[in-house]
């Protein structure tokens, strides 16, 4: 059953653009200096607690950029940055738990990190949660997450557009009371942030 669940999550992200997303939103404007930093300097700053150094170090380990690819080290550094509320670290960490990249597939941990990123306004995270729920035939929950992803002011306009399309598709399979309930849940969830 675990391997079936893992295969489901891998298939989910193999077919979406989210798996290949360059996740740099909500990172300060001086972030490019972290991209240009030597590994020794980046490691030093990350060890000193710099949240963005931790994020970029994790990204390098995840992608194998200037260093041997190491998903477990990426998880470690993303976790440190995510605990300091670096939204793209929370998103990447959630996706890694969904895929089982560097860790065992763990939907509970994936949801925890994705929900944290969604609460900080990253609609890529709420869209990912919607995809998970839709694949599991939790259509009302999926509708709620798509509804959140489609709101004005969310981070990514392309994701907002995709979410609006998905809302239309799901509406064909839901009653008006199901949709109203999902909208109410998304309003309540959004206001609780």
Image: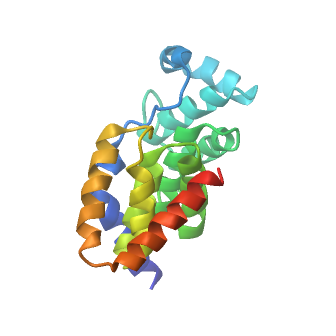
Number of numbered labels in the structure image: 0
Identify the residue at horizontal 23%, vertical 74% (top origin).
172
Residue 99 visible, this angle: no
Pick the front one: 131 or 92: 131
Judge left or right: residue 53 versus residue 84.
left
Pick the front one: 101 or 164: 164
Looking at the picture, how far across and down is residue 90, in whole percent?
A: 57, 46
Looking at the picture, how far across and down is residue 95, in whole percent?
A: 47, 54
Pick the front one: 141 or 95: 141
Identify the residue at horizontal 41%, vertical 77% (top origin).
178
Pick the front one: 69 or 115: 115
Judge left or right: residue 77 versus residue 14.
right
Judge left or right: residue 160 versus residue 46.
left
Identify the residue at horizontal 62%, vertical 40% (top origin).
77
* Corner quadrant of residue 55: top right
Does 92 appear above or below 168?
Answer: above
Does 169 appear above or below 65?
Answer: below
Residue 45 visible, this angle: yes
Looking at the picture, how far across and down is residue 142, in whole percent?
A: 40, 68
């Amino acid at each position: 059953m675990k391997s079936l669940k893992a295969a489901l999550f891998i298939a989910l992200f193999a077919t979406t653009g989210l798996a290949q997303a360059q996740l740099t939103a909500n990172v300060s404007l001086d972030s490019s200096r972290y991209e240009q930093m030597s590994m020794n300097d980046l490691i030093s700053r990350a060890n000193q607690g710099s949240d963005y150094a931790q994020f970029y170090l994790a990204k390098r380990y995840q992608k194998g950029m200037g260093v041997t690819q190491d998903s477990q080290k990426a998880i470690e550094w993303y976790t440190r940055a995510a605990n300091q509320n670096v939204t793209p670290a929370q998103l990447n960490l959630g996706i890694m738990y969904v895929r089982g990249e560097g860790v065992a597939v763990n939907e509970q941990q994936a949801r925890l990190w994705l929900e944290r990123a969604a609460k900080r306004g990253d609609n890529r995270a709420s869209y990912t949660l919607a995809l998970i729920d839709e694949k599991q035939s939790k259509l009302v929950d999926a509708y709620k997450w798509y509804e959140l992803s489609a709101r004005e002011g969310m981070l990514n306009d392309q994701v907002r557009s995709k979410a609006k399309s998905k809302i239309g598709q799901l509406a064909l399979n839901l009653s008006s009371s199901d949709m109203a309930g999902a909208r109410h849940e998304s309003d309540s969830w959004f206001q609780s942030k």
